[in-house]
């Protein structure tokens, strides 16, 4: 599903989008893509929320659209990784691993 506000796009998957390996007690939300339009590119970030009990961390990694034509979208994307450190207080940040390897994906509307 794509929400278009002219200078930005918000993209939500309409397919199962859970992370393949879940640690016990970890809840994982589907990815959300936030893209900004510029004269010569469409780029932004991929977000995924991770929760352990009441604690939550939102991972964010870059994404770039390399082609968009007809019913297909080609992206350079990597998967948001789960946190390696959880905050013990609301004002503390989450600890993140290095970003995963990026790859080209082709998404097609069916």
Image (cartoon, grey):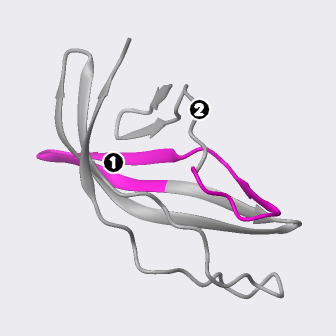
Above or below, 57 against 91 in this view is above
Residue 82: x %, y % from top left: 59, 68
Q: At 35% across and 54% down in the image, what residue appears?
A: 44
Instruction: Say left or right for 95 vs 77.
Output: right
Q: Secondary structure at mark 2?
A: loop
Mark 2, Cα crowd under 10 Å, few <14 / some 14-19 / many 20+, is few
Residue 27: x %, y % from top left: 75, 55
Residue 20: x %, y % from top left: 57, 50
Q: At 49% across and 64% down in the image, what residue appears?
A: 60
Residue 94: x %, y % from top left: 65, 81
Labelled disc at residue 102: none
Q: Choose top left, top right, bottom left or bottom right for residue 102.
A: bottom left
**Tag 2 and tag 1, C-beta contact below 8 Å:** no
Residue beneath label 2, please? Answer: 16
Quarter placement of the C terminus: top left
Q: How many marks?
A: 2
Instruction: Say left or right for 48 vs 44.
Output: right
Between the residue at mark 2 and the residue at mark 1, the CA separation in whole angstroms equals 25 Å
Q: Is residue 85 magenta?
A: no
Q: Secondary structure at mark 1?
A: strand
Instruction: Say left or right for 53 vs 106.
Output: right
Residue beneath label 1, please? Answer: 36
Q: At 51% across and 66% down in the image, what residue appears?
A: 81
Which of the pair 45/24 is nearer the observer?
24
Q: Is residue 39 magenta?
A: yes
Q: Earlier in the sequence, mark 2 or mark 1?
A: 2
Q: At 36% across and 58% down in the image, what residue appears?
A: 78
Q: Choose top left, top right, bottom left or bottom right for residue 99.
A: bottom left
Instruction: Say left or right for 104 vs 63.
Output: left
Above or below, 106 against 88 in this view is above
Marks 2, 1: nearer the viewer: 2
Query: Which stretch did the figure color magenta?
Result: 20-46
């Amino acid at each position: 599903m794509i929400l278009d506000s002219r200078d930005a796009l918000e993209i939500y998957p309409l397919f199962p989008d859970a992370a393949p390996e879940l640690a016990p007690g970890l809840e994982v939300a589907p990815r959300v893509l936030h893209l900004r339009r510029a004269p010569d590119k469409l780029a932004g970030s991929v977000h995924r929320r991770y929760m352990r009990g009441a604690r939550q961390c939102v991972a964010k990694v870059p994404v770039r659209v390399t082609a968009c034509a007809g019913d297909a979208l080609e992206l350079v994307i990597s998967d948001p990784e789960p946190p390696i450190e959880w905050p013990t207080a609301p004002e503390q940040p989450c600890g993140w691993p290095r970003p995963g390897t990026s790859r080209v994906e082709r998404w097609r509307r069916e």
